[in-house]
Amino acid sequence: MFVLVSGLVVWDQRTARDSVDLTEVAAAAGLEVQTHEDQQEAAVARDVVCNMTVRRATAYQVTVAERTYFFCSTYCRDAVVAEPARWIQAHPPSLTAGADKHLMRGIPAWMYQYGVLILLLVSFGLFELLSWLRERRGAPLTQPALDARQDLLGAAWVRRLVTWKPLRFCFQSVCAAFFCLIIYAGLFGNQNPSMNVAPLLTWTIWWAGLIFLILYFGKLWCFVCPWDGIATWIERLKPWGPRQSGMGLGLRWPRKLRNIWPAVGLFVLLTWVELGLGVTMVPRVTAYLALGMLGMAVTSVLVFDRKAFCRYGCLVGRVSGLYALFSPIEVRSKDDAVCSTCRTMDCYKGNAEGDGCPTFEFPRTMQRNTYCISCGECLKTCPHGNTTVRLRPWASDLAQGGKGRSDEAFLAIVLLSMTGFHGLTMTPRWGEWSDAVQSSLAIPAQASFSLLMVGLLVLPVLLFALLSKATAMIGRVARTRTVFLRYAYALLPIALFYHLAHNAEHFLMEGPKLLALASDPCGWGWDLFGTAGWAVPPMITLEGLWILQVFFVVIGHLYGLWISERTTRGLVPDRLRGILAQIPMLLAMLASSTVSLWLLNQPMEMRVSAM
Amino acid sequence: MSRTRVALSLLLGALLLLVVPSTPAWAHHIMGIPHYSYDENYPQAPVLKLIENVGQWEFQLTAYPGKPVPGVPTELHVYVVDAQSRSLYRQPLTLEVERLSLLGSRHEVFGPREVTLSENVYKFYPTYDAVGNYEITLSFPDGEITSTLTFPMVVGEPGSPALILGGCVGGFVLLLLTVRSLKIKRARRAARRAS
């Protein structure tokens, strides 16, 4: 998939688009064409219809007299071809009434319709057909476990490098430097978000890129996390090595909070603050949020035992933990037999080489990535060298099933609804709905936003509970709760891939502006690397992005179906009943993926800070 | 040269000046003050002057007074020239003032209002309703796009980041002291038990 996505981006950037000459049409209409010689020489241009910055070499073009106009897609180009008088003049209007705002077109209607068609075709029957074919070949009905694994620490030098004690410190200190830059620029830099690196680096590069990082490298973020790094250095007063005696009190985390509900609450709160108060556009508040996270991490390390905050409270760790069930990287014990004869349990307790598992996991019994923070301590402490890092098929943790936990299941549904909600708030429709609620209930904008957010948070949970009830009844499963908990994990790939589709828009379209801001991170008029004046075009054209987005949604849906089918096999032994029992869950997944495509079909208001 | 001849020459020079065609001097004045002495002589009240560049244009925003008082009308003058040729920007300009809350929400206190050039400057008269951080946003058509420019404005003495940062550091030190004292207390208790 990595090769496919990268290949698409490269192909997209190397493909020149066709050009249309409107000189005669414009002359016949008597249009005044303004020419800027300096702009003609630049590598990028601005689409006069949607205001997007486009790369000239790969943009669609319309030529009028000596002036060439560049467009993000055929849609903007065709708008000009259809109504040249409206767009080609000295000061043409833009799609967006606001000044620097850039309204990005959603996927075209035909792509949306074909996408839904593909979802419909694969939702009902594909996996049953595969199952039937397998049965005809005489293979067992129950699906095989995904056992394929590749030990990444097989080479001795790689293991030595990974278990080198200062390694994590090196990575964390680099991230901590970026973290300090964000704090400094956010607090003391220019508060215009388009001139300050803090919002772009936080919300467009890190927050959007984090999902891609999880897709390919699992919990790598936790390995380099600056919050954990700084908190640990403060508590231990040394950069690396086992804890031995630190400054912390080492109290036990409260029993009632030994779940991820605190992280779920923080995630919902962050979404509300991020979207409801628009903090992505305020450098100073971005810095406050980063400091707040650091404060929680430091307090937790000083007061509680091990890394209790990482396990129970960190919203980034828990969201990435749940998504990492899908990731192709895992830290596990190599041979259970070796672990069963081990009497020291150093991986849990720690020794002179490293700490016991900071998130209270026991590698011998650890089956999932959820709570592992990839710190590598167990690799150092195991006296038998029996823990390792392995490459595995995607979604391996999800495929193995299990009982499920209510806090995790709830977070899975919250992730699905909140990522959709995030996309929805960026569409013009959201403004219409919010205004309608505001005027009909005579409440302020903030209350209207909160009300709609609560509605969109609760509604999917209720609908999923109802559909779980239907599945339980059809499948004759004793408890609806069991169905709810187990099928909720099947929604994770749908949430993850919609998240990727949405974030690709931010990351690929807005991310390149970092090159310009790197020279002037605080917006003080510096030009450190000579790039401050660069107008960097997106990494992909709009049409390339659309293909990528639809691809992501369909892939996520396929994985969701696959997990759902495996869950059904485990829950409902009877095949025909299983097919029928699965229908309500298929409807839930189909609705989620269709909403995802519909959201991608809507025009998106991009962040001013990054355009 | 005799004194009479000097006096006649001066008189002739003065008469010649009368016949030289006069031209409007607006291009060399800002607010009626000659541009070369503008900064030295005007205004008498403390002002805030902010200068920003957008593309070819140089924006100079002058606020009277520079430290506004809540509820008291103020003046904002915007002077826009081409950075190279120093020729004036003459198209309408829109200004909007918003109050920024701590968590980023914005409350509009003025505009958006569009004005045209008057005596070489654009004049706006906003009133800031409360102590706080404000953002002044200027919008103007620039070639094919509408560009914006923002200026910060502080009214009164709102909480500064330094204050919050100081609070964070203070809280951190307090936490460290509390944790340390608890550890010492715990160690002493353990020692007492052992003895």
Image (tube, rainbow, N blue to C red):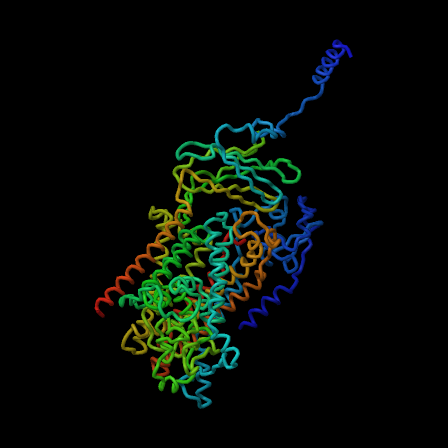
Residue A44: horizontal and vertical position, in percent?
63, 55
Q: Position of residue A98 (x, y in %)?
A: 51, 47
Q: Residue at point 50% right, 82% down?
A: A154
Please, is residue B97 above or below residue B3 in the view? Answer: below
Identify which residue, A53 or A227, lies in the foreground.
A227
Direction bottom: furthest residue: A138
Toward the viewer: A361 or A505? Answer: A361
Residue A417 figure quarter: bottom left
Residue A366 visible from this viewpoint: no
| Residue found farthest to the top | B4
Residue A184 drawn at (x, y percent): 47, 52
- Relative placement, left or right, of A437 versus A105 is left
Residue positioned most to the right = B1
Q: Position of residue A456 (x, y in %)?
A: 37, 59
From this view, report whether residue A32 is shown above or below residue A472.
above
Q: How many marks?
A: 0
| In the image, residue A420 above or below residue A376 | above
At 40% across and 75% down in the image, what residue appears? A352
Q: Is residue B55 visible?
A: yes
Side of A518 where B158 appears, left or right: left
- Quick one: B116 or A569, which is closer to the camera? B116
